[in-house]
Image (cartoon, grey):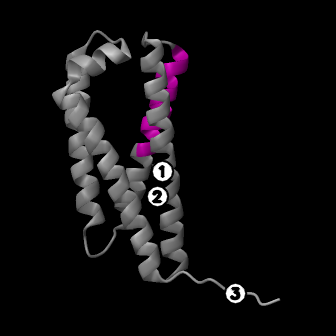
């Protein structure tokens, strides 16, 4: 039986991390655009009764998406900046969980699930960012 050793090059690791950041940017931009251009409908889904909050979240997500895009397209990926992005992603997930389980916000059933699913997706991005940073370190 022949064994094959798979090695990860520095370029592969950078591409993995860049693609993760770009995917996060795309998801953030789509959510941001939805909040910006259809705040009332998103607010109705969530059951908040505060479309202005949805609008502000949309603007914030578009800004975040722009930062992600900028970081992902730089010639050199700055480890500290990606760590900050990962921390922000984790903060979003923790904040979402606190809102859902503390019941401080009376989300509709659809809103509860929307927040939970979005938090899961963001948690996945955070995990991929951590993996990407580790791959980048080990490929040096």
Q: CA distance from mark 2 to mark 1?
A: 5 Å
| Location of residue 38 in the rendering, given as x and y in whole percent from the top left corner | 20, 25
Regarding mark 1 in the picture, which secondary structure is present there? Answer: helix
Reply yes or no: does residue 96 show up in magenta: yes
Compared to 12, does 123 lie above or below?
above
> Is label 2 in contact with label 1 (beta carbons under 8 Å)?
yes
Q: Which residue is mark 2?
A: 129
| Location of residue 98 in the rendering, given as x and y in whole percent from the top left corner | 51, 24
Task: Give 2 or 56, whichever is nearer the viewer.
Answer: 2
Q: Which residue is mark 3?
A: 4
Regarding mark 3 in the picture, which secondary structure is present there? Answer: loop
Mark 3 or 2, nearer chain start: 3
Q: CA distance from mark 1 to mark 3?
A: 30 Å
Identify the residue shown where x is 45% and y is 43%.
122
Q: Any mark on residue 126, and which?
A: 1
Identify the residue shown where x is 24% and y is 53%.
67
Give the mark toward the camera: 3 or 2. 3
């Amino acid at each position: 039986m022949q064994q094959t050793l798979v090695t990860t090059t520095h370029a592969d690791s950078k591409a993995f991390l860049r693609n993760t950041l770009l995917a996060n940017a795309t998801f953030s931009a789509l959510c941001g655009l939805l909040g910006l251009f259809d705040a009332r409908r998103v607010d109705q889904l969530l059951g908040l009764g505060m479309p202005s909050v949805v609008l502000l979240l949309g603007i914030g997500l578009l800004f975040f998406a722009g930062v992600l895009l900028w970081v992902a397209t730089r010639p050199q990926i700055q480890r500290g900046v990606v760590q900050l992005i990962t921390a922000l992603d984790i903060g979003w997930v923790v904040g979402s969980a606190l809102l859902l389980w503390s019941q401080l916000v009376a989300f509709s059933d659809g809103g509860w699930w929307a927040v939970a699913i979005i938090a899961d997706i963001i948690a996945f991005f955070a995990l991929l960012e951590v993996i990407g940073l580790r791959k980048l370190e080990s490929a040096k």
